[in-house]
Amino acid sequence: MRAFKFLIGLLLAPVAAVTVQSLAGLLADLARTPGARSAVAALVAGAMLGAVARAALRHTPRLDILVHEMTHVVWTWLFGGRASRLRVGRSGGSVQVTRDNIWVSLAPYFFPLTTVALLAVWGSARLVFGNVGAQWIWLTLLGASWGAHTIGVVHLLRVRQPDLEPHGRLCSLTLIVTVNLFGAGLALAIVGNEGAAGWFFRWVRELTLALRALLDVWGLG
């Protein structure tokens, strides 16, 4: 099984590279679109502020540990499992789950729970109250939460993480990087009015082109 997951990690590496390429192309296109510039600028500025603020913290805040463990809980629920004995301390936390797989184990590293919760609050408030403040404020807050999440993940991955061990570091890291990049592209596409479908088809198109190029190199095209 570990050999299979190592192979998955190798296969995901070029997928991560293509996702970086797609994300760079999306940013370039949005920068040339007048209607999308302000929204994307607010999101990116917020992400930078959140990243700087999180990087300035020397120790992992207890809130980060709680969010980390709660993300395990949420994804356990998504797969029909149950969670119990949630523990949060200064040096770390833990939770017991009845359903565990690679998605549950790695969810805190690619699923920004705070950002998703904030987005749910914004969406619910708009449905109930209509106008709930300037859009750029919400986008800045969303970006800040995602930026803080990203730096928090980087800090966690600097030391050995038991969550990664059952799946192998290569498979875990390539999956984490790929999903985080894809999520960033998805957020930018929605904010920039390209839409989730537009981003997905852009990504699939570039992935297909990369696969064809790789097959040509191997003489299989």
Image (cartoon, helix red, strand yellow):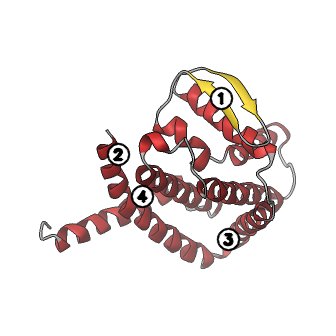
The residue pinned by badge 2 equals 5
The residue to which callout 4 is attached is 201
Return the disc, 2 or 4, that comes first in the chain's sequence. Answer: 2
Amino acid at pointer 3 = Gly
- Dividing the picture into quadrants, the one containing residue 183 is bottom right
Q: How far apart are the alpha carbons under marks 2 and 4?
A: 27 Å
Q: Which residue is mark 3?
A: 35
The secondary structure type at the circle numbered 1 is: strand
- Give the residue number, with chain letter if any, for mark 1: 95
Q: Tag 4: residue type? A: Phe
The answer to whether one can see residue 122 in this image is no
Rendered location of residue 112, percent (x, y): 65, 48
Q: Amino acid at mark 2?
A: Lys
Residue 170 lies left or right of residue 145; in this view the side is: left
Dot 4 crowding, Cα within 10 Å, few <14, some 14–19, many 20+: few
Within 10 Å of disc 3 (Cα), the crowding (few <14, some 14-19, many 20+) is few
Query: How far is mark 1 from mark 2, CA to CA?
Result: 25 Å
Instruction: Name the residue: 51% across, 24% down.
Output: 99
Q: Quadrant of the N terminus?
A: top left
